[in-house]
Amino acid sequence: MRRLLRSPLLWTLLSSVAVLVGVTAWLLTDRATSRGDALKTGALAGGAIAALYGLWLNDRRRRTEEDRHEIERSRISDERFAKSIELLGNDADQVRVGAMHSLAGLARTRPEYRQTVLDVLCAYLRRPFEHPKFDPDADYWGDGERKAAAERERLVRRAAERLIRDILPHSGTTGPTFSLNLSDARLDKLGLLGRRVGWFGADRCEVLTYLDLTDTQLSGKFLLENVTIHGEFVLTRASFERKVSLDNTVVETAVDFSVATFAEPPSLEGAKFAAGSTLPVASGDSG
């Protein structure tokens, strides 16, 4: 009985009948209105109550269906994420690349996964990695198979570096910012061209070919301490909006800091740059 009394349908029917009787009775007080017209008008008013209930019921069903679809999408996304993480440990390099692209696709379609996917790709680049370019003095590169495996892994890591750039938002856009933790990583070709980055940390990392920050907007702290960059460190039109630390960083090619914008003078304690480098311009001025 209590369940029946709480039923929206019951109260809708009672309300519809009440409106029907009330409107009809009210119209009958006017002698100019016939009984038939009064009854028709009352029925329309009562029917309107029932129609409103029908609209509410349809909207409730629609929202329930949307919630069910969202739960299903979340479940599928979680399974896809877990499977991709599992495949990152596969021995085949093409499988690892496929897993990375799957994660990047997930980050694009499910924004709540973006930071997590970026963290995973950065973590992959922190995995131990040996290559003749990074370790030219090692005595085991006469092994052709080992050298070929190292080159395949290098290509996988390049894919991770490209996907990190693709996932990041463009410079000048609004919305959430994402951080990159590349500390202790071995990087080959990391280009964040025209992207917006929050906190950036790459302490103790090693860069082989280049770290390109052309047109990059860095809205968080930029920490590049105890780093060795064998190739280029490109800062063309890069914008550093918070603290920058390059303490004990070594760059083996000339760096032009004057083409970048710094909100405050960067820390360069113990840093070493190749001959021909141009020191940073302070006070947010561009060179």
Image (cartoon, rainbow, N blue to C red):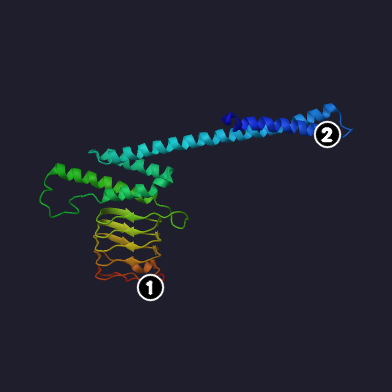
Q: Quadrant of the C terminus?
A: bottom left
Q: Residues within 10 Å of mark 2 (few under 14, many from 20)?
A: some
- Which mark lies nearer to you, 1 or 2? 2
Q: Position of residue 62 (x, y in %)?
A: 55, 34
Compared to residue 87, the image places residue 198 above or below, namely below
Which secondary structure lies at badge 2? helix
Q: Quadrant of residue 241?
A: bottom left
The residue depicted at 23 percent of the width and 45 percent of the height is 153
Q: Earlier in the sequence, mark 1 or mark 2?
A: 2
Which residue position is annotated with label 2? Answer: 27
The residue depicted at 74 percent of the width and 33 percent of the height is 19
Q: In front: 8, or 263?
A: 8
Compared to residue 277, the image places residue 163 above or below, namely above
Mark pair 1, 2: CA separation: 83 Å
Q: Position of residue 116 (x, y in %)?
A: 36, 48
Which secondary structure lies at badge 1? loop
Which residue position is annotated with label 1? Answer: 282
The residue depicted at 51 percent of the width and 33 percent of the height is 65
Q: Residues within 10 Å of mark 1 (few under 14, many from 20)?
A: some
Residue type (three-letter) at the residue carrying disc 2: Leu
